[in-house]
Image: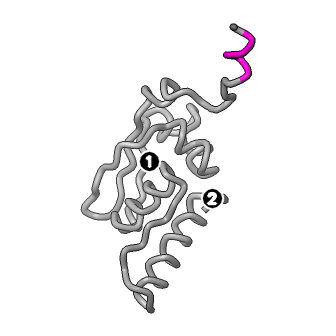
């Protein structure tokens, strides 16, 4: 019976892996603070992986600042980070494409190659 159960187990991370280590990402000016699971951010952002190392201030304080970013774009980035989907509620047209382009630029800045 145990062997049968083992066959169905996944190598994917457990929910418990994300329960601790919440970091704060401060976005925009004035800043909006977003709580983010450190592990998932580090997995999908090479920038965050480097910035959150213990030898850097961000890693010691568990806080990243992105003062030049819009909180709406970062919010969409987080949606992608957690769901692996991009939901754009704007009708098809220039505004939609501009918003998606800004999200892509943010992904490039954070070195989120999967976006």
- Quarter of the figure with residue 66: bottom left
**Which element is circle 1 on?**
strand
- Residue at 49% x, 29% y: name it: 15
**Which element is circle 2 on?**
loop
Please provide percent x and percent y for residue 47: 60, 52
Q: What is the C-alpha distance between the residues marked 1 and 2?
A: 14 Å
Q: Residue furthest left?
A: 30
* Left-right relation of 45 to 75: right
Q: Earlier in the sequence, mark 1 or mark 2?
A: 1
The residue singled out by tag 1 in the image is 64
Q: Residues within 10 Å of mark 2 (few under 14, many from 20)?
A: some
1 inside magenta stretch:
no
Please provide percent x and percent y for residue 97: 49, 84
Tag 1–tag 2 contact (CB < 8 Å)? no
Please provide percent x and percent y for residue 80: 49, 57
15 w.r.t. 112: above or below: above
* Left-right relation of 42 to 1: left
Magenta region, residue range:
3-7
- Quarter of the figure with residue 27: bottom left
61 w.r.t. 105: above or below: above
The residue singled out by tag 2 in the image is 111
Please provide percent x and percent y for residue 7: 73, 22
- Residue at 60% x, 49% y: name it: 44
Q: Which residue is nearer to you in this view: 13 or 56?
A: 13
Q: Quadrant of the N terminus?
A: top right
Q: Residues within 10 Å of mark 1 (few under 14, many from 20)?
A: some
């Amino acid at each position: 019976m145990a062997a049968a159960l083992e066959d169905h187990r996944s190598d994917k991370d457990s929910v418990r892996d994300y329960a601790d280590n919440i970091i704060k990402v401060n976005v925009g000016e004035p800043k909006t603070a977003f709580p983010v699971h450190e592990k998932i951010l580090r997995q999908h952002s090479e920038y965050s992986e480097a910035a959150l190392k213990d030898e850097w201030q961000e890693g010691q304080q568990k806080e990243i600042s992105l003062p030049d970013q819009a909180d709406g774009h970062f919010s969409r980035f987080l949606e992608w980070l957690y769901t692996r989907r991009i939901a754009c509620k704007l009708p098809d047209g220039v505004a939609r494409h501009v918003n998606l382009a800004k999200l892509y630029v943010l992904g490039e800045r954070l070195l989120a190659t999967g976006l």
